Image (tube, grey):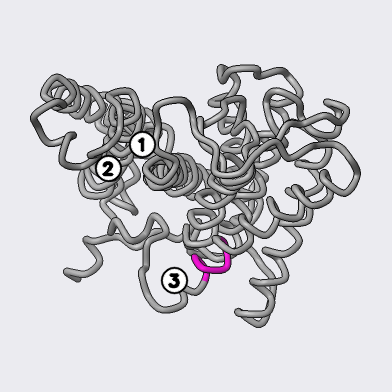
Amino acid sequence: MSSFLDRTLGLVWNREERRPRAPVRLVAVALVFLLVGQAISAVFAALSDQYQGGVFALLFAGTTLDVAIQTGSTLFGALTAVISAVVLALVVDRRRFSDYGFRLDRAWWRDFGFGAGLGVGLMTLLFLVSLGAGWLRVTGFGVASEGFSPGVLVVSYLLTFAGVSLSEELLVRGVILTNIAEGAAGVGPFSERAGSVLAVALTSLLFGVLHAGNPNATVVSTASIALAGVFLAAGYALTGELAVPLGLHLTWNYAQGVMYGFPVSGTRVGVAIIETELTGPTLLTGGRFGPEAGLLGVAAVLLGTGLIAWWVRRTRGGLALSPMVWTPEFRWRDAE
C-alpha cells in the first residue's frame, strides 16, 4: 500500500526537486493567473469608475477616458503577470523570480538594448522596402484620431506596448516555456536541448493561438504570429534571459503602430508619426492585419532570428541553447 501511494504521489510530485511535476505546474500557472487577474481586475474596475477625479486623471492627464482605460488596462495586465509569476516562483516553482529571465546585470541591459534596436531597425527596413517598391504610400505626419493629442498618444502607447511586452514575454516565454523545457528534459527521447526545442515549438503555437481572435485575423496571420513566437523565443532560448525578447517585442510593436502607422496584429492604434496606407498585394504586406501576416513580415522575422544568432555568437563566443532555460535555480538549495 505504501509503495502504491509513493508511486501515485510520484506522478505529481518531484521529490528530487521538491516541487510539483511540470504538468501540475502548468495547470497551476493557469489557475494563479486567473485568480490574480480577477483580483487585479476588481481593483482596476474600481479605479476606472473614479477616473474623472481620481488616480487615472493624474496618470493620464490630457487623455480621454477610453485611452486612459486602455493604457491602464494594459499596465494592470502587466502587473497581473508580475504578481502571478512571483507567486508561482515562491509557492509552486520554488525558485527565484530572476530565474524567469530577469538577472538584471550589465549584460542583461546590453541585450535589452540590442533587442530594442533590432525591433526598430527591422520595422524601419520593412517600411523603406515597402515604400521603395510602391507597396505603401505616406498620407500624413504626426496624425492622431480626432480629439486626441498626438504627443499624449505617443507616450500612452509606449506604456501600452511596454505592458504588452512584459506580460506576454513573462507568461509565454519566462514561465511556460521554462517549465516545459525543464519538464521535458531527459524524459523519453528528449535530451535537455531537445526539450528546449519542444518548449519553443509549443509556446510559439500558443502565441499564435493567443492572437487568433484579434481583429482581421486569418489562418495565415495566426501561422505568421506563431513564427514570430519562434523569433521572440530565440533570444530567450539562446541566452537564458528575457532581455532580447522584451526589448524586441516592445519596439517591434511600437515602431509598427506608432512610428509607421501599420496595423499591429490586426489593430490600428489611432496615432502615427508617419501615417501610411498599404497598397501592395496582401500576400506581401499582410493587408488589414498588418505586416506580420505578409511575406515581408516573415522575411523580417527570419532576418531578425539570424541577427539574434549573430549577436549571441558575438557576445558569448559561441552559439548554443542556454542551459539556464532547463536548469532551475531552487531557493531551497541556498539553505543547504
Q: Are the residues tagged 1 and 3 within 8 Å (C-beta)?
A: no
Mark 1 crowd level (few <14, some 14–19, many ≥20, 10 Å Cα) = many
**Alpha carbon separation for disc pair 3 and 2:** 25 Å
Residue in the image at 39% along x and 55% along y: 100
Q: Are the residues tagged 3 and 2 within 8 Å (C-beta)?
A: no
Mark 2 crowd level (few <14, some 14–19, many ≥20, 10 Å Cα) = many
Mark 3 crowd level (few <14, some 14–19, many ≥20, 10 Å Cα) = some
**Alpha carbon separation for disc pair 1 and 3:** 29 Å
Q: Amino acid type of disc 1?
A: Arg
First along the sequence among labels 1 and 3: 1
Vertical placement of 62 versus 316: above or below? above
The range drawn in magenta is 111-115
**Residue occupied by mark 1:** 25
**Residue occupied by mark 2:** 88
Residue sitting nearer the eye, 202 or 251? 251
Residue sitting nearer the eye, 137 or 310? 137
Q: Is residue 182 left or right of residue 336?
A: right
Residue 316, image x, y percentages:
61, 79
